[in-house]
Amino acid sequence: MVPLSAYVAVSAILFITGLLGVLIRRNFIIVLMAVEIMLNAANINLVAFSHYLESMAGQLVALFVIAIAAGEAAVGLAIIIVVFRGKVATNVDEMNLLKW
Amino acid sequence: MIAVFFAYFAVVSIVAAVLTVSLRNPVHCGLALLALLMHVSGLFVLLNAEFLWAVQVIVYAGAILVLYLFVLMLLNLKTDERYLHSSYLYFLGPAVAGAGYVLFLLIQSPYEGAKGNTPASVVLEHGDTYAVGIKMFSDHLLQFEIVGVFLLGAIIGAIVLAKTPKPMPKPMDGSERRSNR
């Protein structure tokens, strides 16, 4: 039997990896992919606790997280297309129009 | 046996996540993300969540990842020479140290809590899809409706954002406007 802490450890490692990806990558699309990694880590946590604490609510929240990830991907990629149309750059440190 | 499968899915998903954030070519990053999503869905099967396994494969690997690869190939991104942020070393050390500390705390935690009313035997009786459906359409109906409205808003927002903007109308004098009409 795999203990719950093993699932939580895998989820934590994946979350830290995704967070590092958001912080250190320059490509906007890879940053969005790293956000997907973090959402997946949260899903692993939710489903593992749902199984070990014998409640169904965790799996439902994981479903909602997947739906939100779909919406986030659609809107984020549309924003990338708009930025790319204006100036040919998809690096996050070249998008400084909103910076004060 | 379950431990062997868990070790395989866990190790491969962690390796795929590291490759996703560290590979140079964006298309390779997308393919590593595909491997990560498939192995996370394998973890869901080990946790008696077959419905979430199907949703993960269909929605994540089938829809979201194809959208990412489509945009990558539409924009025809070149591989950058300097693909990491300029000050990434400031983040790397504290992140690894913090992750080690968090893992140390997590391994020690007992994780005791109030048990719910659906143990594995109840889930296995009619299947996971049945249990998810009964729970979703009885207790969580409002959240389900909110997610539907949210997805509609996301679709409309994506279309409005990505639409090709109309060119600005040129100022015309009266005669041209009359002839155009």
Image (spheres, helix red, strand yellow):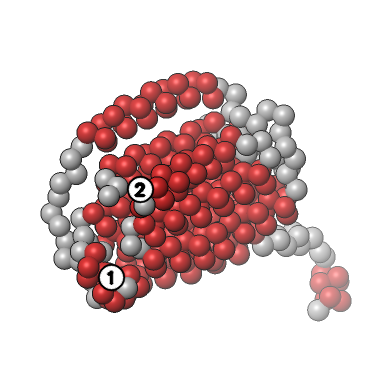
Query: What crowding class fits label 2: few (fewer than 14 Cα within 10 Å), some (14-19), or many (20 or more)?
Result: few
Residue under the point 71% across and 33% down: B80
Please name the amino acid that badge 1 sits on: Leu
In the image, taking residue B76 as reference, residue B92 lies left or right, namely left
Residue under the point 42% across and 70% down: B148
Front-lying residue, B17 or A96: B17
Residue B3: image tag:
2
Query: What crowding class fits label 1: few (fewer than 14 Cα within 10 Å), some (14-19), or many (20 or more)?
Result: some
Front-lying residue, B67 or A93: B67
Circles 1 and 2 on the same chain: yes
Q: Is residue A4 above or below residue B136?
A: above
Please name the amino acid that badge 2 sits on: Ala
Q: Is residue A86 above or below residue B45?
A: above
Residue matched to label 1: B124
Q: Position of residue B42 (x, y in %)?
A: 44, 56
For disc 1, the chain is B
Say what secondary structure mark 1 lies in.
helix
